[in-house]
Image: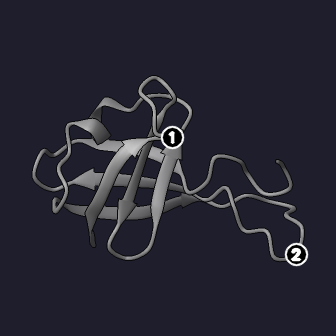
Amino acid sequence: MTSITDIGYRLDTPDSGSAIVYTNGGGQVSYDTIPEIHRSRIGDKVKLCLVSLPEDCPPGDDRGKIYRATNLRTGETWEAADSQHSCGSA
């Protein structure tokens, strides 16, 4: 369980994808705009679950974990990665 501290866009501009940050230090980012993220509000409680880990990553590169988030206020759910790129990429 966590809550939302920031909601925005991947590159800080509309149409660049979605980005969200949580009080537990985690976050999600997507090249696609995720409407469920943008219907959320700062302070909303969220259930955040790890659903996928990247494989064959270089040592120390742990990017690319996929999380499913459920906003407890709206009841909406979305999935997105913790980074713009998976491990071993740009």
Type of amino acid at the residue the image marks with label 1: Arg
Rendering colour mode:
one colour
Q: Which residue is drawn at 44% across and 45% down?
A: 79
Q: In this view, does 76 lie to the left or right of 64?
A: left
Viewport quadrant of the N terminus: bottom left
Type of amino acid at the residue the image marks with label 2: Pro
SS at circle 1:
loop
Name the disc covering residue 59, or none. 2
- Front residue of this view, candidates 50 and 84: 84
Dot 2 crowding, Cα within 10 Å, few <14, some 14–19, many 20+: few
Dot 1 crowding, Cα within 10 Å, few <14, some 14–19, many 20+: many
3 over 9 or under it: above or below: below
Number of numbered discs overlaid on the protein picture: 2
Q: Mark 1 points at which residue?
A: 10
Name the disc covering residue 75, or none. none
Q: Give residue 24's position: percent from left, percent from top.
A: 37, 76
5 over 39 or under it: above or below: below
SS at circle 2:
loop
Q: Give residue 3's position: percent from left, percent from top.
A: 24, 67
74 over 22 or under it: above or below: above
Query: In the orientation shown, which residue stands out farthest toward the left?
Result: 73
Q: Which of marks 1 and 2 is nearer the N terminus?
A: 1
Query: In the orientation shown, which residue stands out farthest toward the top?
Result: 15
Distance from Cα at disc 1 to Cα at disc 2: 26 Å
Q: Residue at x 50, y 28 (%)?
A: 32
Q: Which residue is drawn at 46% across and 68% down?
A: 26
Front: mark 1 or 2: 1
Q: Which residue is drawn at 28% across and 71% down?
A: 2
Q: Give residue 50's position: percent from left, percent from top.
A: 49, 63
